Amino acid sequence: MRSKRLLSGLVAAALLATTASACGGGDDTAELTPEGLGGTANQQQLDALYEAAKKAGHKKLVIYSETLGGGSARPVLDLFEKRYPDVEVQAQAGFGAQLASRLDHEFAANQHVGDLLEVAITDLERHSAQGRLQPYAPPTAKGMPQEFTCEQGQALGSELSVLGIGYNTQKVKKDEAPKSWNDLLDPKWKGKIALNSPLQPGHGAQIVQYMLANGFTMDFVNKLAAQDPTLVPGTRALVDRLAQGQAWIGVPSATDQFLAAEAKGAPIGMVLPTGGGNLKHLNCMGIIKGAPHAEAAKLFYSWWYTPEVQKAIAKHMFKASVVPGAAPPKGMPPMDQFKFWPEIPPAQYTKAQPGLIKQLNPIFR
């Protein structure tokens, strides 16, 4: 994938704006109307895919996805099953090396279990490079911005989050919270920051990599390390530490994690820097080659880009939509307010990250 800035993509994709306009409030399953699918034409296309799945006997769908395998996604999957009751969805959590190993075994044995991938773009490119995706273009996603075409004719962006700065609202007042990445260097935050560790693959290393590619220098990195941050192993640990008051500031973490914790009553606030650049975390969807329930996978993949899904992922999963015009999750600014850093091609990003982590080790140790 070679992406452009999000704003230009939104403008270019006016064809999808009408489809997304139906994304409003209310109960997800109160009225399963044609409008929820983007109109009668979309409904007819999806009904045809549903009939094809039933005719093929594809009454089950197995999705490999850390995101859809989590509890917050269950209402979204329930909505699909209410629309199409003859297809049962089984979402199994998996990503990175664990998922790669699982697919290695399935392809080596030619005994396929998984039907659909919904994974980070870096994972997606790895599987695409190994020829593990089946070409398919969802009829409901015509006019998708080029920046969300993960692999041409094989995979599209499915949802995204933005990396931000969290703070404990019992320790930090809203007007005193850091408003930019450079604000993290204020001496008052010394010893009070939990940092998603940049010494392992993940959001911590990722954002440092993007910063260094977009005007920040190693001087910034050294000054951040001099703030004596507590390194934590991943996003969930970061949010937990922040919610428990063990840190005043938590950085960086994805918006969906912050918003989900806040919705459960955690004393967490979030700042999404809109100046100095920001990073979006994109997930992608594609059908696995040899999928045992390929027709059901086509149905789900096509249904995903309808208004009712975009509303549901914002409401339950706190994820932003790739469909222009769809409302963002509550508490998150519209996407066109962000200036996103140009994307580093996944292959380049993956190749360079081990060297960066090695470089950062003596700085943060």
Image (cartoon, grey):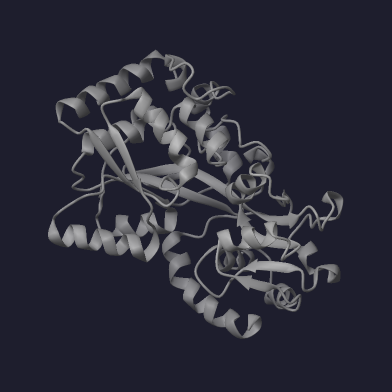
- Residue at x 55%, y 64% (from the top left corner): 234
- Residue at x 32%, y 36% (from the top left corner): 137
Where 289 falls versus 139 (above or below)?
Answer: below
Tell me if residue 13 can be seen: no
Tell me if residue 354 can be seen: yes
Left of 59 or right of it: where is 342? Answer: right
Give the camera-side residue of 261 and 181. 261
Left of 254 or right of it: where is 265? Answer: right
Give the camera-side residue of 120 and 197. 197
- Name the quarter where the C terminus is drawn: bottom right
Give the camera-side residue of 219 and 303. 303
In which quadrant of the rendered view does residue 299 lie?
Answer: top left
Where 324 falls versus 128 (above or below)?
Answer: above
In which quadrant of the rendered view does residue 58 lie?
Answer: top left
**What is the x, y in percent for residue 271?**
73, 51
**What is the x, y in percent for residue 120?**
44, 54
- Residue at x 53%, y 56% (from the top left corner): 343
Where 9 falls versus 280 (above or below)?
Answer: above
Left of 116 or right of it: where is 283? Answer: right
In which quadrant of the rendered view does residue 97 lie?
Answer: bottom left
**What is the x, y in percent for residue 277?**
67, 55
Left of 109 or right of it: where is 118? Answer: right
Give the residue at the far bottom of this rendering: 362
